Amino acid sequence: MNKAFKALSDETRREILKLLSEKDMSAGEISDHFNMSKPSISKHLDILREAELVSSEKNGQYVIYSINTSVLQQILGGFLDFFNKNRKENNNEK
Amino acid sequence: MNKAFKALSDETRREILKLLSEKDMSAGEISDHFNMSKPSISKHLDILREAELVSSEKNGQYVIYSINTSVLQQILGGFLDFFNKNRKENNNEK
């Protein structure tokens, strides 16, 4: 969970997730959307992969990245649910 | 937004938010829930305050902390909504 929030604490990484929510992409295709070196993008992709927010699969000479929407939902949604549930319970007590 | 996600990338800080979702507390009351020095807790509270996830108000000799649930909802909820909306649109296209 720490890794996921840390991965999300960078705007480029959040933008990469938004791009991958449109379609799966290779590292090269992702790089084309940023004014940044390929090794930098590659490092951001590693951080997202370690946090399990994206998956990668080798396809011939390319590595194709896809977003793990369910992990994102589970972590952010699960955390938010706690506060929503708690607020409802506190309101009911009043 | 970076600050908020960074603030959330630590388990102690997520626990503090959960405590404050029950009721407002002084730094001392918060410290009582952790096996950690008061200066360490104070540092975590500063990070949460800088990220605008908590507010503090001086009340006599105490500083009382409260959670900004709306900021949490806005940041995490807003980010999640993007992916939910996007997924629905992609499904509609199929």
Image (cartoon, coloured by chain):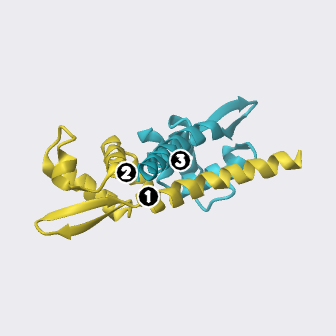
Chain colours: A cyan, B yellow
Q: Look at mark 3 in the image and give the residue it sits on.
A: A44
Residue contact at pointers 1 and 2, CB within 8 angstroms = yes
- Residue B1 rendering spot, x and y as whole percentages: 48, 61
Is residue A72 among the parts visible in the rendering?
A: yes
Left/right placement of residue A82 relative to residue B15 reads right
Query: How far apart are the alpha carbons under marks 3 and 1?
Result: 29 Å
Looking at the rendered image, the quarter that the C terminus of chain B falls into is top right
Residue name at image x 66 percent, y 55 percent: B82
- Residue A8 rendering spot, x and y as whole percentages: 50, 50
Instruction: Please give the chain letter of the residue carrying mark 2.
Output: B
Question: Secondary structure under badge 3?
Answer: helix
The local crowd at label 3, few if under 14, some if 14 to 19, many if 20 or more residues have their Cα within 10 Å, is some
Instruction: Please name whichever residue, A39 or B27, is drawn nearer the observer in this view of the structure.
Output: B27
Amino acid of disc 1: Thr
Residue name at image x 38 percent, y 59 percent: B53
Q: Look at mark 1 in the image and give the residue it sits on.
A: B69
Residue name at image x 67 percent, y 50 percent: B83
> Is disc 3 in the same subunit as disc 1?
no
Query: How far apart are the alpha carbons under marks 2 and 3?
Result: 33 Å
Instruction: Please name whichever residue, B26 or A23, is drawn nearer the observer in this view of the structure.
Output: B26
- Give above or below for A59 relative to B4: above
Q: Look at mark 2 in the image and give the residue it sits on.
A: B21
Left/right placement of residue A10 relative to residue A34 reads left
Amino acid of disc 3: His
Is residue A29 among the parts visible in the rendering?
A: no
Question: Secondary structure under badge 2?
Answer: helix
Instruction: Please name whichever residue, B66 or B44, is drawn nearer the observer in this view of the structure.
Output: B66
Outermost front residue: A94
